[in-house]
Amino acid sequence: MSRASVQSSAPGKVILFGEHAVVYGQPAIAVPVSEVEARATIEPAPPSSGLSLVAADLGQRFTLSEAPPQDPLAVAARLTLSRLAAPVPDAKIIVRSSIPIASGLGSGAAVSTAIVRALAEFLGRPLPPADVSELVFEVEKIHHGTPSGIDNTVIAYEQPIYFVRTATSGPQLISVGAPFTLVIADTGLPSPTRRLVSQVRAEWQRDRARYETLFERIGDFAREGRRKIQTGDVEALGPLMDDNHALLIQLGVSSPALNELVDAARDAGALGAKLSGAGQGGNMLALVGAERAEDVTGALRQAGATHVIRTTVE
Ligand code: PMV
């Protein structure tokens, strides 16, 4: 059967509240970041050529039949075919992404989401967000070991979410009472999620009482943050972000580079700032009023940010 080319994309994401504690059952809030994206294009290929994958940004090019069993891109394609009980089509998948890798912006989940969506659509059987999220979660396990599931969920649904790992119902989408602006800045250093999640786990095993108290308090920021987002009390989110950052320092996942960017944003008039994602490197985010967005962006660049994104949550 001849098929037309299709293209699908998926946004990046940032975690506003609750990273790490979310792995232990606390709630977290994440929002999509559409200023960066992963894109998968699928073109029909000659009969009997099989399915090939080209990801120039990641330096990868292979056919599905030759791909290493644990290659995340290939796993995303295989899981989609298996979910749809579809034979391997003769096609080429071209993957591109403007999302920095290992920076807490959900690059891995976005690339997988774009592949799953594009392949399902190419086969004429688009999948709903819940199914996309579930398949991408399986791929995330390769990247992260024990992911909470927040990245695949916010990226597949493309809406602000309040996420609880242990919830049996679907994700809770948050309605935003008043739009707010975030400035997201990259330290340029890698944020090794798998290693940081293991580091926190080891510390938790050494001192469960202390860590569970920290997780509970971090969860309170997500609970309170959701209420403030819904009622449009934007200014109140700033101090919650500052306090969440202080507890992430106590968890041992911040770094001098992240703290410098957080301080620079606050000094330039941000309403609040914190690291976002697994920590150590990667990105931080600052909540800004419209009149301070330029100043905060400039201050973050001045303080050494390698990449700055401005996004509005609405
Ligand atoms: O992938 P990252 O860097 O956004 O980190 C995910 C957030 C963690 O809570 C640290 C891990 C997880 O699986 O939720």
Image (tube, rainbow, N blue to C red):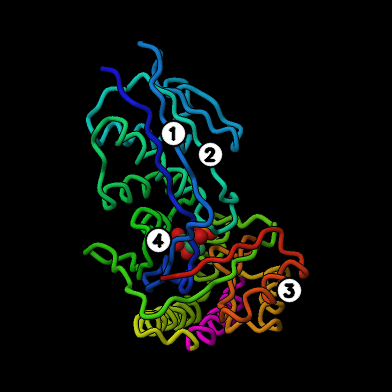
Q: Residue furthest front?
A: 291
Q: Which residue is mark 1?
A: 41
Q: Which mark is residue 299?
A: 3
Secondary structure under badge 3?
helix
Decide which of 141, 89 is in the foreground and name it.
Answer: 89
Which of discs 4 and 3 lies nearer the camera? The answer is 3
Pointer 3: residues within 10 angstroms few (<14), some, or many (20+)? many
Label 4 beta carbon less than 8 Å to ligand 1: yes
66 falls in the magenta region? no
Residue 132 image position (x, y, % from top left): 31, 47
Earlier in the chain: of badge 2 and badge 1, it is: 1
Up the image or down, 302 lies above or below 71; here it is below
Task: Give the amino acid type for the residue marked by disc 1 in the picture.
Answer: Thr
Earlier in the chain: of badge 4 and badge 3, it is: 4
Q: Which mark is residue 150?
A: 4
Quick check: marks 2 and 1 in contact, CB under 8 Å? yes
Label 3 beta carbon less than 8 Å to ligand 1: no
Residue at left 62%, top 75%? 293
Earlier in the chain: of badge 1 and badge 4, it is: 1
Earlier in the chain: of badge 2 and badge 4, it is: 2
Q: Which mark is residue 132?
A: none
Q: Which residue is mark 2?
A: 96
For the residues marked 4 and 3, what is the alpha-carbon distance in whole angstroms?
Answer: 30 Å
For residue 42, side relative to residue 246 (left or right): left
The image quadrant where one finds the C terminus is bottom left
Pointer 4: residues within 10 angstroms few (<14), some, or many (20+)? many
For the residues marked 1 and 4, what is the alpha-carbon distance in whole angstroms?
Answer: 25 Å
Residue 253 quadrant: bottom right
